[in-house]
């Protein structure tokens, strides 16, 4: 039963994280003068339009993942650099807002007193949804800001530099390979740590440090604020990541 709750909650949480993320990209691009996303039907909350199967499954398994990139034509922007920058950060800003909303909803479910197996199932189900939505939102926020092509962080670099910039060219040419390496390396470290029992493997997990930064640094203002409101210790999260 617990496994079923975790799987279903993970699927819903990923939808809550990715669909608004991609919609925000398309909407901001549209407001900046580019109607491409609208023409392709991407200004919608329909998950079928946004979900990439591989990125979807990866996010459920690891907390990191991606969706189908929203098509953007920067040549349509009223102001090229401003449009590129605002469109690039729209998704991650939306994810942080979602994390800010999901965390108090999670704390609220902890206050619910449930009686009976059915009631306990639904309470646990919604607890898992809001918990994972909060955690995934923070992970996707920081993961997408890595300056590696084709992530949003590279688009930020792209909006602030010229095409001949050597760092920008390197990140575009090799960013996806670096990204693949980081994901594979994280999988290997996780296997060595969990299945093999090699405790030192976690110290070599580069994306693990990214998750730590997302939880401890980016998540702290949200956790501190809402824990105070709900009466929990400021630095304590009532769940384990």
Image (cartoon, rainbow, N blue to C red):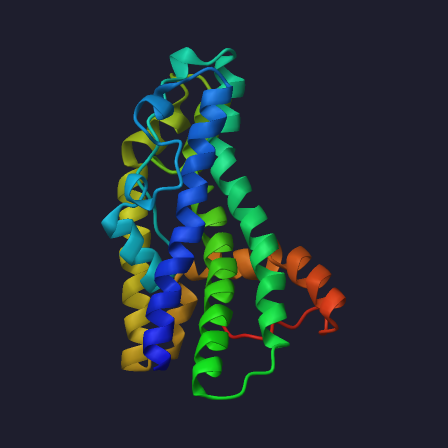
Compared to residue 49, the image places residue 10 above or below, namely below
Quarter of the view holding residue 151: top left
Which residue appears farthest toward the left when viewing the image? 53
Q: Is residue 24 left or right of residue 57?
A: right
Nearer the observer, 93 or 15: 15
Q: Is residue 219 visible?
A: yes
Quadrant location of the N terminus?
Answer: bottom left
Q: Position of residue 221 (x, y in %)?
A: 68, 56
Q: Residue at 48% of width from left, 38% of height from top? A: 91
Q: Residue at 40% of width from left, 31% of height from top? A: 43
Q: Position of residue 160 (x, y in %)?
A: 51, 23
Q: Position of residue 44 (x, y in %)?
A: 39, 36
Compared to residue 172, the image places residue 120 above or below, namely below
Nearer the observer, 156 or 13: 13
Q: Position of residue 189 (x, y in %)?
A: 32, 67
Q: Give the number of callouts.
A: 0
Quarter of the view holding residue 230: bottom right
Q: Residue at 65% of width from left, 62% of height from top? A: 223
Q: Residue at 29% of width from left, 50% of height from top? A: 55
Nearer the observer, 126 or 70: 126
Q: Is residue 146 visible?
A: no
Q: Is residue 122 left or right of residue 195?
A: right
Compared to residue 114, the image places residue 109 above or below, namely above
């Amino acid at each position: 039963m617990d496994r079923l709750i975790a799987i279903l909650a993970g699927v819903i949480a990923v939808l809550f994280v990715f669909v608004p993320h991609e919609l925000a990209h398309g909407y901001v691009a549209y407001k900046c003068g580019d109607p491409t996303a609208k023409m392709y039907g991407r200004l919608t909350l329909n998950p079928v339009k946004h979900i990439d199967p591989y990125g979807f499954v990866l996010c459920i398994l690891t907390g990191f993942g991606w969706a189908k990139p929203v098509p953007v034509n920067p040549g349509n922007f009223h102001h090229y650099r401003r449009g590129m920058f605002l469109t690039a950060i729209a998704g991650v800003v939306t994810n942080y807002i979602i994390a800010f909303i999901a965390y108090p909803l999670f704390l609220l479910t902890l206050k619910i007193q449930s009686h009976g197996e059915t009631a306990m199932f639904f309470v646990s189900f919604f607890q898992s949804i809001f918990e994972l939505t909060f955690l995934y939102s923070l992970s996707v926020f920081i993961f997408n800001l890595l300056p590696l092509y084709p992530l949003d962080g590279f688009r930020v670099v792209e909006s602030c530099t010229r095409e001949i910039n050597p760092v920008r060219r390197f990140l575009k040419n090799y960013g996806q390979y670096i990204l693949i390496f980081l994901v594979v390396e994280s999988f290997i470290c996780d296997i060595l740590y969990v299945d093999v029992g090699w405790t030192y493997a976690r110290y070599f997990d580069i994306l693990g440090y990214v998750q730590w930064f997302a939880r401890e640094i980016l998540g702290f203002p949200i956790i501190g604020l809402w824990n105070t409101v709900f009466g929990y210790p400021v630095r304590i999260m009532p769940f384990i990541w």
